[in-house]
Every structure is written in C-alpha cells, then in structure tokens.
Image (cartoon, rainbow, N blue to C red):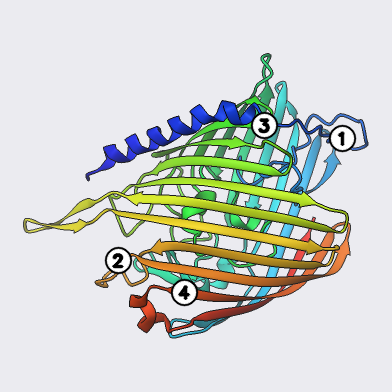
Amino acid sequence: MIARRPARLFLFSFLSLVLCAAPAATARAQHAPQDHGDHPGEPCPACPPPRESSGTSWQPDLAGSSHHWRRAGSWLLGTHLQVAATAIDERGPRGDRAVVAPNHGMLTLRRSAGGGTLAIRTMFSLDPLMGARGYPLLGQSGETADGINPLFDRQHPHDLVMELAAAWERRLASGATASVYVAAVGEPALGPPAFMHRPSARLLPTSPITHHWFDSTHITYGVVTVGLAPREHLRFEGSVFNGREPDQHRWGLEVPRFDSYSLRISINPTPSLAFQASAGVLNEPEIFHEGADVTRLTASVMYARRGTRWSFDGFAAVAHATRTAILTPLGNGFDYYVPGATSPAALVEGTLALGSRHHFIVRAEAARKGELFPADHALHLEQFAMARTTLAYALRVLDLPNARVHVGGAWSALRTATALRAEYGNRPTGTLGFVQLELH
C-alpha cells in the first residue's frame, strides 16, 4: 500500500485552514432565542434543538424537525415514519423499470441525565424487501448486491438497521457544550445531513447519484464522535469509525471496528443558514479495492426561509475524493496495480412550497464517476464526467396532525461523457411517480 501519508497531510492542512477561519465567522453570528417547552415560556431541558439532523449534523434552525414529540414519564419520545410507493422508469440502453417503496422509520428517546441530556436514537428500514439490487437509477454506482460484482446504474437498498446509537451532551461551566455520540450503527462527523433528512429534497424518494461523495457513511458499523461547541452557533467534532461500506447482507448486523477518522466544523451564523466543512480518511471503504484508502473532503451550506404563504429550503455542496494507489500481489511474482483516483462532485437541491400543498423540487448534480462497468471490465477503473438533473412536483393531498400524504412525479435527464454515449444513448432520461406517506 502506498500514498497514505500525503492523504493524511492533505487532510490536516485542510482542517487547519478551516479552524483558523472559524472564529471570524462565528463572531458575526446572530443569536436566535429558542423555546422548546411544551407551552410558551415553559423550559424543556431535554427537548432537541431544531438544528438537530441525521447523526450529529446540523441543519438551519428554521428547517424544522420531522419528528413528532410526546412525553412518556421522564422521557420524550420522537417518532417519524416515511414510505414512498414509487414507480420508476429509467430509459435508455442501460435503463430499467421497477416499482419499489423506499422507507425508513425513526424512534428517538430523550431525557435529562448526568447533568446533561441523553438521547437514544434508532432508525430502521424495510428496504431489503426490494431485493439485493435495489432500484434502477442511471448514473449511480457504489456497493454490491452479491459481494462479487459492483452495482452500477442502480441504487442499493439500505440496511434493516440504519442507526442504533446513544448521544449525551452537557453544558460546561465555561458555557461551552460537550457531546459524545456512540453508535453500533450510526453516522460519523463527515459531510452534511443524509439525503433523506435534508428538507431541500425530503419529498424526493430516490437517492442522488453523488450519494457516495456526501453521505454514504450515514450507515456505518461502529462510530464514536466527540464534539465541543464553544459557542451556540459553532461546533467542532472528531470521529473514529469503520471505513468499510456495508456489505450485501442487508438484514444483518456487522461487527463494529474503528479504523478511520474524520473532523468536522459546523457553523450556524443565522437561523436560516447552516455551514459545514469536513474531512476524513476512510480505511479500505470499497470491497473491490482492498488496500486502497479514500480521503474525502466536503463543504456545504443549507438555507431555510419561511414566509406567510411560502417556504424555501436549499442546499449546495462540493466534495473531493482521493483514492490511494495500491499494489495487489497475484502470485508467481506478479502484482496488479490499481492507480489512485481523484474525483470531484457537486450537488444543488431546492424545494419551494407554495401555500401548504404545492411543492416544486429541483436537484442538479455532477461528478467524475468510476465503477460504471463490472470489476473485470477494462473500463472499470476509468472515470467519466456525468451529470443528472431532476425536476419534481409534489401535491399534499392529506394534512393531519400526525399524518401527511403527498402525490408527485419527477423527470430526470442524464448527461454523460461522449465515450459513454454508446452505453447510455444520446439522451437518457428517467421518470417516476410516487405516493408518499409520513406518520409522526
């Protein structure tokens, strides 16, 4: 294995620049009073801050929680269930059709404990029911259905257990807040909130094709994160975690290990904004590239605005991934050389809601992608420019205190490098229709 040391030097150089810039940014932060009580003016020490999102990531204070909270003795219980019956039609030589139901359910328990707040976080999905190959999504790549061949032009299903974690935080005498997050299955401090939790695209039932640059670590078997928030709108975090992506056995649990690390800074300068910058070194994340580590850098901004009869949620992010080169012994004195690879990605999402019923959604993303061919194919390691744009509309047809139903559709266009036109066709497109149920 070679080239690991430059990756680590790059990681710490990047974080040093970010940490030096943080004090100036937070000096301009605006304080937004918050009231988490059951009634106006009533304190609620165990209530979650509105910026809490997936793992330990932050979203804008105005974004709002998807959970519905209720009291059970000394505990607060937060629940959320989302299921989207979806018909997918991806057109072109590599296209396919499917009817699937991406879903997830969350149960969170919170209470005051040890002078701070304890949270037990769980998240589950019945995605494995859709089959090991998941659903068609042109331009997507990552993970495997059988442990032998990589998935491409398909989105893998999530594991049954998506999160099983405990988090504890406490306000210190200095006014800073310290936190600890320990997960058998969880999300390290690397990247923005996972795509199904972002308000900018919460109504889209399918994954971005840039998922493996920004939030593929949201299901990680083994995570420990420590955080320190010296001010209300600033937090530094560090994680040790399992760098290997989940295997093809979606119903089971994997043994946690701690061989990778990441650092993240989060800044919420106003109630409408949430910034994060993060970097991590992932130890052998891909089963097809044994011995190859990946250094990942991400930066993102989330925006939330609420008007009298409208609302807007936006998200923009960039990422940069570098895979180390490796020499794999084949026996008989021969080695197989896997070159290093550097690939950037960018993603923009937005949802505009007019009134309480009409939602207009856009997602635009681009990346240099490899692994678009089988592992034994000559072009498996080649990278190609790829971009996908999705336009969607969702109509809220039911709005009850604890239940919502949206009916919608989306159209996508994929643009590929010229060298891939024979594989994907000149103008590959995709459509989908969905009925999404949310229960709280």
Residue 46 vs 160, above or below: the answer is above
The quadrant holding residue 199 is bottom right
Identity of the residue drawn at 70% across and 64% down: 203
Q: How many numbered tags mark residues here? A: 4
The residue lying toward the viewer, choosing from 100 and 88, is 88
Mark 2 element type: loop
Location of residue 434 in the rendering, given as x and y in whole percent from the top left corner: 69, 75
**Spatial distance from mark 3 to mark 4, Cα to Cα?**
39 Å
Residue 290 vs 140, above or below: the answer is above
> Disc 2 residue type?
Glu
Which label's residue is closer to the chain start, 4 or 2? 2
The residue tagged 1 is 37
Location of residue 226 in the rendering, given as x and y in whole percent from the top left corner: 55, 30
Quadrant in which the C terminus is drawn: bottom right
**Spatial distance from mark 4 to mark 2, Cα to Cα?**
17 Å
The residue tagged 4 is 415
The residue tagged 3 is 233
Identity of the residue drawn at 51% across and 43% down: 190
- Image position of 160 (left or right of 340): right
Location of residue 111 in the rendering, given as x and y in whole percent from the top left corner: 76, 32
Evaluate if marks 3 and 2 touch, with contact meaning CB atoms under 8 Å apart.
no
> Disc 4 residue type?
Arg
> Disc 1 residue type?
Gly
